[in-house]
Image: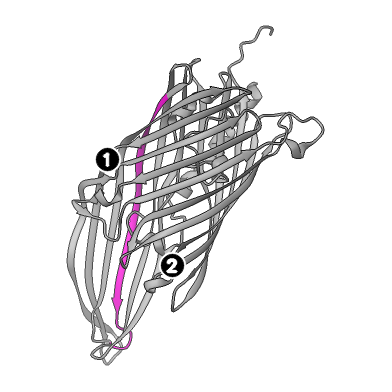
Amino acid sequence: MQKNISAFIVAGLVLLPALLFAQFNNNTTSPFSRYGLGDLHDHTHGRTSAMGGATLGSRNSQQINYSNPASYTSTDSLAFLFEFGFNGRFSSYKNDLNSFTANDVNFRYFSMSFPISRRVSTALGLTPFSDIGYDLQVNQNLDYAGQVQHGYFGEGSLSRAFWGLAVEPVRNISVGANLFYFFGNLTRNASITFPENSYMYTIQKNNSLRLRDFGLNFGIQATLPMKDDQSLTVGATIETEQKFTGFNSDISYKTLVLYDSSGNPIGDSDTLTYLAEVKDKIIMPLVFGVGLSYVKKDKLELNADYHFHAWSKATAFGEPYQFITDRQVLALGGEYIPDRYSIRSYMSRIAYRAGLSYENSYLMVNSQQVKDFGISFGVGLPVYRSNSTINISAEIGRRGSTEKNLLRENYMKLNFSVNLYDLWFIKRRFD
């Protein structure tokens, strides 16, 4: 057991710097990330990413379910869980004028969970919240100025470090909460240049948001036992409207560069606006979700979730977000294990998973809400002579539309995670 504990600690020390690097660097190249707080991440770990993200009612004793903190009490009384994951997104974008592709692969999250007592368990980790990453150029021609180039560039990430606690006050009822630290930086730059007219000013605008503060979300799960090792669990989560401390910088300036007869640069520059690190509040939306999970022990699990995010009520520094509306997500998924304890067949011990999700995203562009539909599938590969699992999944989907001069994304996401399971709390009877 001492060797296993040392291995877990070394794994954490090795993986944490890589994860921190990933969290502080933008992990997307999506034009959709230009709006709001960027591309939002769902709070799903390796197992449930193959199940459409449906997870609010799920209670699995050998996997971590961060999306509902009430699930932490499902951990075995002697178990320690450590999980980390990678993912990749491979996208093709198309509108009425152009098409292009983009690929993003990065280290994404880590978490760990263990019991404190028979009815109390805890978890902690670091997960992404949103990413910004785009580089766009729009050209137009004006009679009085010739060609005009509009450039848009953005990058950055928001993350959450969390510590969760769950209690089972009575049998089959569990309540929990996550205390999280919300942090990160988002940068957006814009420019206007006149490549055919050297007597026109170049306009630059740089905006950045730095966010840091603590927040809370809550969860509950109630399980109804049924005959033949079957059960039905109802889960719910809520994150109330919360105010977070943010620092806003907004700087814009104009530049004119000319050359004299000797070729020496002359010109003019002037600052148009200057707002540096102004402290204010960002109001994040009310978020709630409900889920249902049917389980036949060691054989079958079926989940269904509904989420609502009141983004239309969110504000940044006293102003509502542009192009943002309420978000709704419906997710369905399942897991099937032919024979979890089979001795002869490894294939029978594999967990086979599939799911689908439909989302009315929080983006509203040209009076049209951006929708997202995806199907997912994957496997949970048991590690030899262990309860540890390697989770592999893929999701194929479509976001947006080419109607009304908008953008459509066809994407495939690949997820890879390792869930390490060990017994740490066994009292020795013999030395």
| Position of residue 422 measured from the top left corner of the image (x, y, whole percent) | 62, 26
Residue 62 visible in image: yes
Please tell me whether mark 2 sits on a helix, a strand or a loop.
loop
What's drawn in magenta, residue-wise?
175-197
Q: Say left or right for 280 vs 363.
A: left
Q: What residue type is labelled 1?
A: Glu
Farthest residue to the right: give it: 344
**What is the chief secondary structure element of the magenta stretch?**
strand
Q: Using the numbered discs, state the Cα–Cα distance from disc 1 to disc 2 in whole angstroms.
A: 31 Å
Residue 401, numbered label: 2
The picture quadrant where one finds residue 255 is: bottom left
The residue lying toward the viewer, choosing from 69 and 26, is 69
| Residue at position x 69%, y 7% in the image | 430
Disc 1: which residue:
241
The picture quadrant where one finds residue 147 is: bottom left
| Residue at position x 45%, y 37% in the image | 291
| Position of residue 174 measured from the top left corner of the image (x, y, whole percent) | 44, 23
- Which quarter shows the C terminus? top right
